[in-house]
Image (cartoon, rainbow, N blue to C red):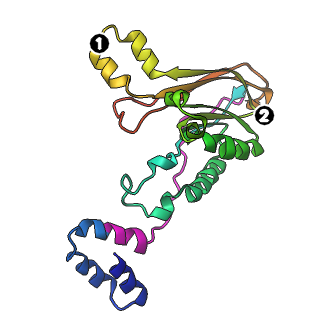
């Protein structure tokens, strides 16, 4: 790859000749992927229009709010081994977190649920930044954090829910630990215990009450319940629960 980089910067070879030369390498496919990662730029994806499913009845009190669910991809999961098609600089957390925050602010949802949020990043990045935008939030790390030293605990990922304080107040939050549920409901099933017990997947629920600012044409009363879960990468059989 060093030879390829040198050739690219000195412009002694055409792009086509570089690709042809790659096939002299033992891992040609890997080298070709690396070349595209570092030498080829991609345009931004096109804007996707919103599709309204129904129209609110403006003649009576109406509560309209938006919900965003986002897997931010914890830094420790963003590896070249897992995402070989992505250049290293784009996987770097310091680069990604700015783009994630810009995306969250662009949509400006009333309720934001985030998955794979590192504990340290929740308290030192997401919570302070989103509080400036009028949100408050709750967070819970995965179950293994209980057994770890404080310095290691801050790198454990988990679930976060943010809500716009002008529209909602938090009534209650609830943590769901799926391995504990498995123990309580396995009924002697070894298959259930073997699949779920080694995992430390969690769900985080929030019970929210609407405020006057959430309503048009008068004020009503509405209680919103939402849950978001955070699963290990290897637990593909566990489905995600959302608002």
Residue 61 left/right relative to 204: right
Q: Position of residue 84 (x, y in %)?
A: 36, 59
Q: How many marks?
A: 2
Picture quadrant where residue 59 is located: top right
Q: Are marks 2 and 1 in contact (CB under 8 Å)?
A: no
State whether residue 64 appears in this view: yes
- Find the distance from the CA under tag 2 to the CA under tag 1: 47 Å
State whether residue 242 appears in this view: no
Mark with earlier residue (2, 1): 2
Q: Is residue 41 above or below residue 68?
A: below
Mark identifier at residue 189: 1
Q: Residue furthest front?
A: 149
Q: Residue furthest top?
A: 187
Q: Position of residue 206 (x, y in %)?
A: 62, 24
Q: Circle 2 — which element?
A: loop
Residue 95 left/right relative to 61: left
Q: Position of residue 75 (x, y in %)?
A: 51, 49
Judging depth in this view, the residue of 218 and 134 nearest the camera is 134
Q: Is residue 191 above or below residue 184?
A: below
In this picture, which residue range is highlighted in magenta? 33-58
Q: Residue at x 39, y 84 (%)?
A: 6
Residue identifier under label 2: 166
Nearest-to-viewer mark from 2 and 1: 1
User: Within the magenta stretch, is there residue 40?
Assistant: yes
Picture quadrant where residue 19 is located: bottom left
Q: Position of residue 201 (x, y in %)?
A: 45, 29
């Amino acid at each position: 790859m060093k030879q390829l980089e040198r050739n690219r910067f000195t412009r002694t070879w055409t792009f086509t000749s570089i690709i042809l030369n790659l096939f002299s390498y033992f891992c040609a496919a890997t080298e070709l992927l690396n070349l595209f990662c570092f030498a080829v730029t991609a345009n931004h994806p096109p804007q996707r229009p919103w599709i309204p499913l129904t129209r609110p009845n403006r003649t009576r009190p109406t509560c309209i709010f938006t919900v965003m669910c986002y897997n931010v991809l914890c830094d420790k999961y963003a590896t070249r081994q897992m995402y070989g098609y992505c250049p290293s600089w784009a996987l770097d957390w310091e680069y990604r977190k700015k783009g994630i925050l810009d995306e969250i602010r662009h949509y400006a949802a009333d309720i934001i649920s985030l998955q794979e949020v590192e504990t340290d990043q929740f308290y030192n990045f997401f919570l302070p930044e989103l509080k400036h935008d009028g949100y408050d939030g709750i967070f819970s790390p995965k179950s293994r954090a209980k057994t770890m030293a404080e310095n290691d605990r801050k790198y454990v990922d988990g679930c976060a829910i943010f809500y716009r304080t002008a529209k909602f107040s938090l009534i209650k939050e609830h943590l769901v630990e799926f391995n504990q549920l498995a123990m309580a409901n396995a009924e002697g099933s070894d298959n259930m215990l073997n699949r779920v017990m080694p995992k430390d997947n969690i769900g985080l629920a929030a019970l929210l009450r609407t405020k006057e600012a959430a309503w048009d044409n008068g004020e009503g009363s509405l209680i919103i319940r939402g849950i978001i879960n955070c699963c290990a990468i290897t637990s593909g059989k566990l489905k995600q629960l959302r608002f």
